[in-house]
Every structure is written in C-alpha cells, then in structure tokens.
Image (spheres, rainbow, N blue to C red):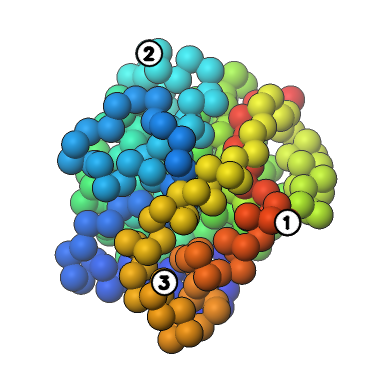
Amino acid sequence: MKQGFFSALYQSSASIDYLLGKKRKFMNLGISDNPSVEIKSTDSEDAHHISLYMKLLDLAPNIHENTKNISALEIGCGRGGGCYVMKNYYSISDITAVDLSSANIRLAKRFVPEAKFIVSDAVEFKTDKKFDLILNLESSHRYSSRLTFFKNVASMMKEDGSFVFGDMIRKNELQEVEKMMNESGLKIIKVETVNKSIVQSIEQHSKKQYPLATRFPGLFPRRLHSFFVTIHSRAYNRLKSGDVLYNLYLLRKN
C-alpha cells in the first residue's frame, strides 16, 4: 500500500476502534442492490456492506455449491468483513486473510476466529498454497504496484480457481489496468460496472456512518473525506460523474 497519510489513518483508526471495543467489521462503500442471500436480523445495519461482498462473490461459478470444500484467500481483508460473509453466508471454512494493518487483523480475529490471519503488504504477499477462490475488494487503488499484485494472485490460484476483484479505477486508466491483468496470466471472464448502486449506497448511509463529517464538512480535511468517501469527497463526485469506475470482475487463469 502507498505510504503516507492514508496508510497512517488506516492503521490508527483500527487501533482506536480496537481499544474502544467497537464492532465495526466492514470498510467497503456498500451497494444498494438487494442481497442474494437473506441478511440476518443481527446484521441489518451492515446489509449494504454485506450485499456488496455477495455481489462480488456471486460472480464466482457455483459459489453456493460444495462451499465446505473451497479454500479461500482474501487479500486486503480489513477488519474481517469479507471473511465474516464467507464464513456465515457461504459456509466457507478454509479461509486465509491478509492485511497490512496489525490493528485490523486484531479486530478481524474477534469476528472470525476460525480464519487464518496474516499481517502482510498485499503486493508482497505470496504463499505456496493454491486457492480455489481469491477475493480482493476496494483496496488495490492504493497498492504500490497493481501489476505485481495481479501476478502474485495468479501464482496462488488453482488452475480452475477464481479471482473476484472489485475496485475503483479511473476511467482513463481502465485499459492499462485490464492490460496488467492479462499480462499477469489472468483472463477477464465477467466485468460489471456498478457506479449507480455504489453512489446510492454512499448517499443513503454516509450521514449515519459519518455524522459529523457529513453535517460539518468544513471541519474535516479533504483527505479525510476521501479516505471514508463521504458525500462531500472528491471520490464520491468522480464516481457519480463516471470519471472513476467501480468495477467488479471475475478472472480465471489463462
């Protein structure tokens, strides 16, 4: 991950929440689409976050069949939200998860103690184990090298494995990013642009998730708005205008 303000904020916000005992497990923007699996009443506040993970995971073929035999790896696992969804909504038990932030990993262990968590930079992480499913959501835009990341993902996939990938990509960089995927030994099987549903989710939930930043935007620096992607952020405006695309991909090995 690129160093500086965002990586420091990423680590410190998790550390504070860990010390305060907060139970926020999701960091993605969420989506306004209906979930493919009924959300439990205890997870109702996180329905938009869970729905985004479901939309991404459902790109993988036969994801709801024989899930107990699936080995899954989430790179950039944050606070364990994706692992929680895989465990509790897809019955996947063999889960490995990686994140740069040790504070995030401590939080994630609270939510999914059965998973194997590893503190590592997403770009540098490699293992000899081969996975049926690799997941990466909403973090690669801050990696030091997407090309290296994609190459490492390809090396950790089984021959018939799936890589489900979702992130924000600048429209003028889309061709370059998809070229990196191809050069890494990955083939795009499906791609879906979901800007409209992502923007609706931000508009519906920003005020509740970030009440002070939404009500008093001038009190907070622009970079803080961009980190959380509030309705006052540049990222929100670019997603709404289409200058930045929010794309979901299913990729297989070439």
According to the picture, the residue beneath numbered tag 2 turns out to be 66
Which amino acid type is marked by label 2? Asn
| Quadrant assignment for the C terminus | top right
Mark 3 secondary-structure assignment: helix
Relative height, residue 57 to residue 106 (above, below) = above
| Marking on residue 232 | none
Pointer 3 or 2: first along the chain: 2
Q: Regarding mark 1 in the picture, which secondary structure is present there?
A: loop
Mark nearer the viewer, 1 or 3? 3
Amino acid tagged 3: Thr
Which residue position holds label 3?
214
| Callout 1 touching callout 2 (CB < 8 Å) | no
Residue pointed to by mark 1: 243
Label whose residue precedes the other's in the sequence (1 or 3): 3
Residue in view at x 51 percent, y 34 percent: 56
Mark 3–mark 2 Cα distance, whole angstroms, equals 43 Å
Residue appearing at x 40%, y 37% in the figure: 51
Residue located 40% across and 13% down the image: 65
Q: Position of residue 170 (x, y in %)?
A: 72, 55
Question: In the image, 50: left or right of 60?
Answer: left
- Return the residue nearer the eye: 226 or 97: 226
Residue 59 lies, in percent from the top left, at 54, 26
* Residue lying farthest to the bottom in this orientation: 219
Q: What is the quadrant of residue 63 in the picture?
A: top left
Q: Nearer the viewer, residue 84 or 205?
A: 205
User: Is residue 71 rendered to the left or right of residue 143?
Assistant: left
Mark 1 or mark 2, earlier in chain: 2
Q: Is residue 12 visible?
A: no
Query: In the displayed structure, does residue 233 sit left or right of residue 116?
Result: right
What's the residue type where badge 1 is placed? Answer: Asp
Q: Nearer the viewer, residue 247 or 32?
A: 32
